[in-house]
Amino acid sequence: MKKLQAIVLLACCAGFVGCSVDDEFEGPSLNDIYGSFSVMQPLDISNRQVDFSQNETTYLTAVFSKNIAWKVQVKGLNSGGIKEISGFSNYLDVDNTLWNGTVSRLPMMRAELCAVELTFENEPDTLRDTLEVTAGRVNQGLLLSDFENGFPDDWVPFVQSGGNMTFIVQTGANAAQGNKYYDMGGNVDWDWLKGMFDIPASAYGSETFALSSNPGAVYFNTMLYKPTDISNALVLFQFREDDNQDGVYNSTNEDMFSIEVSPDEDGWSLLSVKYEDLVTLVNGAASVDIGNGIREPHKLMQVSVLFLANPNSGYTQSYLDYMIFTENSPLIP
Ligand SMILES: [Ca+2]
Ligand SMILES: [Ca+2]
Ligand SMILES: [Ca+2]
């Protein structure tokens, strides 16, 4: 389509006086404003069976009678994950609708059928189609767990003996990734802590996690779910460093950095934090560093996840899925 426009423009300039390139930039054309809208070339999909795990991509094609604001929504019919792409043009092609399997709204895409919907601003037309994702994206990074094989054997869980305690791996289409996620829930009216688990680097084959020494390049990512009607959950992630690299964490003189989050939007959301932005927290408040104060991802010995809520606030619950360290950029799910 771009090539066609270029040829038209060239012919225009060669053949007629007064048709200047400037016309293109002085504002919307009269046709764009007053011309009637129609679909000149129907919606089509370049790759209807796309394997994102093999770095395949897909895009849409169509031609319209005028430039118009459009929106494409691709919805996973199993996951409910959504990819939205929008633009203003008189065509769809590889330049403006290329999709590599990322989502605009969690869950992540998996092997599933997707509904494709194309809508236009101020026009009633809705064009529909479907495509099939044969495999979701594979993300680069150090995956701590996606819970697809259950709760990892080498992790160390602790669960209070409260009421309606879950702290189990659940199976369901509402996982953020794949079919399984970790469900943390319960009522403990005598302690903030409901349950927790430690993730030792030894579970991944060495005394410290295999991460870059550059804290500006390392990101910790995970997905958290807030059930509707539950707003008291706090999730505290702790990162213990073996500052002197003697194979042991000393809580009196070695760094423990943290991030505490309170899921506030219903459904799944992505948490991504750059390692250098981690802070030292004491009872939830920023505090002086315990160790050398240097953020050293290559000295990280243990990640801990604590699930908390005010003991007077009743039952609480959150889900967790897909904990992964990435380097050079946060996770793009
Ligand atoms: Ca999962
Ligand atoms: Ca040490
Ligand atoms: Ca340190």
Image (cartoon, rainbow, N blue to C red):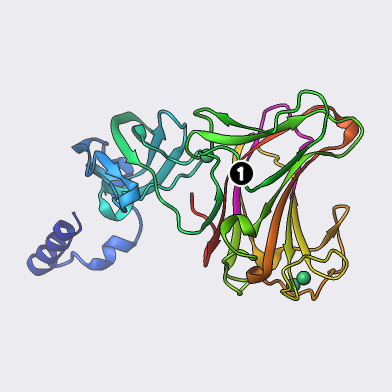
Q: Residue at x 9, y 69 (%)?
A: 14
Residue 92 among magenta residues: no
Q: In the image, which residues are magenta?
A: 221-236
Task: Decide: is 56 above or below 149.
Answer: below
Residue 234 among magenta residues: yes
Task: Decide: is 128 above or below 279.
Answer: above
Q: Report the front residue among 268 and 127.
A: 268
Q: Report the front residue among 312 and 42.
A: 312
Task: Decide: is 193 above or below 276.
Answer: above
Q: Residue at x 14, y 57 (%)?
A: 4
Horizontal and vertical percent position of residue 271: 62, 50
Pick the quarter of the image with the N terminus: bottom left
Disc 1 marks a residue whose amino acid type is Asp
Name the residue carrying label 1: 153
Mark 1 is surrounded, within 10 Å at the Cα level, by few (under 14), some (14 to 19) or many (20 or more) other residues, namely few
Horizontal and vertical percent position of residue 295: 71, 71
Q: Is residue 18 left or right of residue 221?
A: left
Q: Report the front residue among 325 and 66.
A: 325
Horizontal and vertical percent position of residue 332: 49, 53
Q: Quadrant of residue 201?
A: bottom right
